Amino acid sequence: MNAAATTAQPSQEASLFVGENLDVVIPPDRLYDHSDKFCLQKLCRRNSSAVCKLATPYDPALSTMAGKLARKIAADLETRLSMAAQRREPYATYGGETYYNYPPRAKRGAESLDDWAMDILKWTNYSVSTASAGSRHINDSMLTDLEADSVAPSYEAFFLFVAHYVKAHISGMDANGLKSEDCRLILPITKNDTDDDNTNVYVVGRDDSTEFSNVECGLFPLSSCVERQTMSAPHLIVANVEIVRHLDFFYKVEPKLVRKTKELFPNQHNRRFAWGLAASCHTVHAYVFGPDDIWQSSKIDVSGSKGRRELVSLLVDWSLCSVDRLGFDPTIRYVVDGNTGGTYLEIDVYETGKCTGQMEKRTYYSKRCIRAAEIFTGRHGRYFAASTSPEMLNTPEFLVKDMWAISTSGSTSDTHESSFLNVLHAEFDQSSEFSGRFSQLVTTGSVYLSQRDTLVTDSTVTAFAGLPTTTQDATNDSDAAQISSRRCVRHHRRTVLQWVGNPVSAADNPNQIVVAIADAMVALNEAHVKGKILHGNISDRAILFQKTVDGVKGVLGEFDYAFYSGDSAVESPELMLFQSVHRLENAGTSSTRLDDWESILYLLCWLGTFGINPTQRREYAEDYAAKSAADKATRYTKQLTPVLPILDWIQRSAIQNAQHKRLNLSAVSNFRSSILLYMRENSPLRPLALDLYRSLFLHPGCYGVTLLTDDHVAEMEDGDIPAALREIPSINGCRDPLNLRDTFENEIVANLLRVLAEHKQVALVALRNATSVAAGVTESDNRAEISASATPAKKSKRNDEPYDGPAKRTRSKATRSAP
């Protein structure tokens, strides 16, 4: 183990306030997540009184102090609201309600407690006659006072009011055992767009009936001025607040909060879980976003003193609790380089010492996250190019993988992935052909957090202790079954691997992906032949590539969900996109190598449609948005933005996902029109996907992928379907031809390997040609080699004939963009 032993480090919490955010190599990609409404429908556990308690400080003395401080702030707020209410002037009475004119607001930067109280007064509609009445129902019509201004400044004023008292109370308390660096201020962050009066513009979208606003809350040291802050480092944002004026439109503000929360995880590499606030009218709900759940707090009604005290208490707890209670990971710290002024990360990895048998902490250093966490659900997989010292940041030796893996054994010491990697290296390290084709393990271990001076394993059990484990949103038995399948125990683990290359999302040429996939699948096939190992998680994260003198070499990683042939596959909700039909349906059949090969096909289709890297995906998203805008402008003309059938692979339940895949794969014509048609025309991924499809589903003796009813089978002549298909047991009145396909596994896999080998040769020649052109070599120098490797293949006359080489790449005028 060559990692550097831990030396004296700066304060973990203080380090949250320094530096700029690291460059995010892989920006947020919403295409990989379920829709926002789907997340809320399937994952949200509503009206839990335990949500706000999650922010309570661990230390009982500190918790008691936070409670006293919250009560003091709430009492002073009520006094100042009463004084502010007497300064406003009534101007009309309608329906028994009185409406008021408010004094002009102070300019930004010159506000006082009374100014903030006046802003809060507008929001809460406080009046002296109801000051002691507690919570009361407020009709939307009473918000007329806010029609001329956004609600957001009132929310910001609430944060500023609480922060003023927190700073005044905490400053100078070191002698009482509470260090000021252990606390922080929660302050609102200004937006970049301003109006003519230099006041912030908060309106995100508005129609005739409602107005939406957004406020971002950030962490700042106690030394900061209590005012609206500007921030260029997104890793300091602690929560988003989404606001809609009218209570009737609360259902619209929740998806906006989900969307904004998704954007936190790719930009905050130390984010474990996230907080958020959603508000409409006087109703506020706090949210906690975990890997498999969204928890919503009980209603906080700020129109009454009780609700205002609850919101004050939550903000005080956020200011005083440890950073892990805010959802941050104190074992990943942002550090400013004193020489260059740049920012890098310190990443702690715990392992058991080989000599001492004691827990040891090693620190790695990284300035490049090669794969960020795109979404808040699932494993939050992050990959850091790391070194053993800050001086070696530009020459990474290791790949540090941080993720919330599902526990396959129920134990915090689960070593599922490492056990498979050790088996693979014991089998292949002596093989010159397969050496270096798999990720090489250095060390692995759980993430430990300090709670009450005790190291505690970080997991969903410890992080969300006290939160409910059952949902109240299941609308039917099917929904309840889907939800229960998502409830799993995840352990926060960190694995260190030898640096072997980049994920395919870092490729700049699709031919690199073809070569990487070919190498990785050859290695996986050999792993199955010798060790009966199935991967179970083929995705764009599992395929790595490294550039070599001869071109590109593929490496296979991500063995978190690997299993042995004959065992049950590990289930996880984040695997649906690239999962095979049988694994999605959990059909009770044993998994085979064909399931992993099917995942390769889906991966090729996805990358070929949306792009192989963030740049291409961004271009696709911008083009799609432009066409969508054109559609709205010309609503009665031909639609420009087709609804992509491939999106049904992610925005549905597992069973629906499988049904849509069966439909898209049911025939060559369906596969062409629903999937291949939308893939990039000139990409080598499209002909490869077509050839893999033919080999996987059109092998002689099989009968495709469409379920056949018993009545349909009975009506067909013996010569129309394979005799073996009639012998397949009928389940719920249907026969599944994929069960018949498994009997031809060895033949199909051999054919698939041949397909990949042929396409790999074409891709290698294309890569060498591109390199030669870039170096100034004429294309004619390589023409003979290209011609020899890219020989047109024979085309099958019938769909059920055996595969006979790569498909022709010519297209008729009639098919245009279709392959």
Image (tube, rainbow, N blue to C red):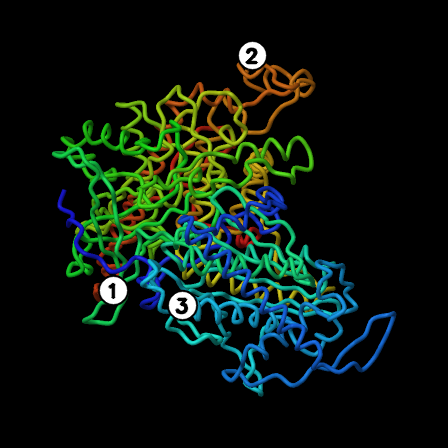
Hey, what amino acid is under mark 2?
A: Glu
Crowd rating for badge 3 (residues with CA inside 10 Å; few <14, some 14–19, many 20+): many
- The Cα–Cα distance between marks 1 and 2, rounded to whole angstroms, is 58 Å
Mark nearest the camera among 1 and 2 is: 2
**For the view shown, which residue lies furthest in the front direction?**
176
Residue marked by disc 1:
774
Residue marked by disc 3:
220
Check the image and report above or below for 541 versus 754. Answer: below
**For the view shown, which residue lies furthest in the bottom direction?**
196
Name the residue nearer the viewer: 211 or 165.
165
Residue name at image x 41 percent, y 35 percent: 406
Residue name at image x 34 percent, y 40 percent: 456
Is residue 208 in sight in this rendering?
yes
In percent of width and height, residue 301 lies at 67, 58
Which numbered dot is residue 727? 2
Is residue 673 in sight in this rendering?
no
Identify the element where label 1 is drawn. Answer: helix
Identify the element where label 2 is drawn. Answer: helix
